[in-house]
Amino acid sequence: MQLHLILGPTSVGKTTRSVVLAKQSKAPVVVLDRIQIYQELATGSGRPLIDELDGTTRIYLEERQVADGDMSTAEALSLTSQIIDQLSLRHDLLLLEGGSVSLCTALFNSGILDKYQTTIEYLKIPNEAAYYSHLWRRMQDALISRPGQPSLVEELDRMWPEQRKLAFVRTVLGYDILLDWCQRFGQSPHQMWNSVQEDCLSAELTGEMFSGYLQYSRSQCQAFDRLVVEYEQRQSLTKIGIS
């Protein structure tokens, strides 16, 4: 059984690439992401809409509620291993799409990839200017509600009355920035967003969101650079019989 792992930083096009390959191969896509498992955080985590999957099969590690709290890396790795083992009984190829640094690092170090014929497709940023423009548009889109997709502000506002949920989402990129802005204005997310629009601060908020995601993207690239190099070196040593 073959595993094809698609790695890359946020907003580089992993989902689009996985959908293309899934349509061509009829293989399911296993999502290596610890935040996309929460439907309540779909917009903030970049979870695609059903029609964006174009009929392909996309498998999340679990469907979890924000009230259930964080999924640990160890738990995510265990679920990943179970899903791969189960699907390997029915499929000759599995597509793994990964952006979670902690989970991907654990997966590379676990030896799970060595059990199968594994190929890695690392999507790097080909053009920084185009990438920055795309990331900026994503931040703008995330702050505006659309048919079938709530805005990041609306997602946060729905959790606003529950401190337990807020404590968790404060650890999630994007929501942490919005919560800081709510604290600055002393208002709920909905009230804060209206105030930002009235005071012409929406561009400033978008810019802060952009900076946060860009910093995260750079940390992802650094981690994935190291993981891919170490994996290729390990494979080379294995091929020549050095353990």
Image (cartoon, grey):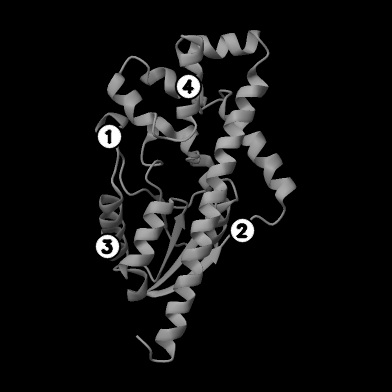
- In space, the residues marked 2 and 4 are separated at their CA atoms by 31 Å
Name the spot of residue 203 as percent of width and height, x first.
Answer: 67, 23
Mark sitting earlier along the chain (3/2) = 3
Name the spot of residue 230 as percent of width and height, x first.
Answer: 46, 71
In the image, taking residue 217 as reference, residue 3 lies left or right, namely left
Mark sitting earlier along the chain (4/3) = 3
* Residue 124, disc: 2
Q: Is residue 6 above or below residue 16?
A: below
Name the spot of residue 135 as percent of width and height, x first.
Answer: 64, 40
Which-is-in-front pick, marks 4 and 3? 4
Q: Is residue 66 above or below residue 35?
A: above
* Residue 199, disc: none
Report the residue at 45% width, 72% height from top: 231
Q: Is residue 88 above or below residue 182?
A: below
Badges 4 and 3: C-beta atoms under 8 Å apart?
A: no
User: What residue is disc 4 on?
Assistant: 180
Which-is-in-front pick, marks 4 and 1? 4
Mark sitting earlier along the chain (2/4) = 2
Could you tell me which quadrant the C terminus lies in?
bottom left
SS for dot 2: loop
- In space, the residues marked 1 and 3 are separated at their CA atoms by 26 Å
- In space, the residues marked 4 and 1 are separated at their CA atoms by 20 Å
Q: Quadrant of residue 143?
A: top right
SS for dot 3: helix
Report the residue at 43% width, 17% height from top: 157
- In space, the residues marked 3 and 2 are separated at their CA atoms by 30 Å
Which-is-in-front pick, marks 1 and 3? 1
User: What residue is disc 3 on?
Assistant: 86
Mark sitting earlier along the chain (2/1) = 1
Report crowding for label 2: few under 14, some 14 to 19, many 20 or more residues within 10 A (C-alpha).
some
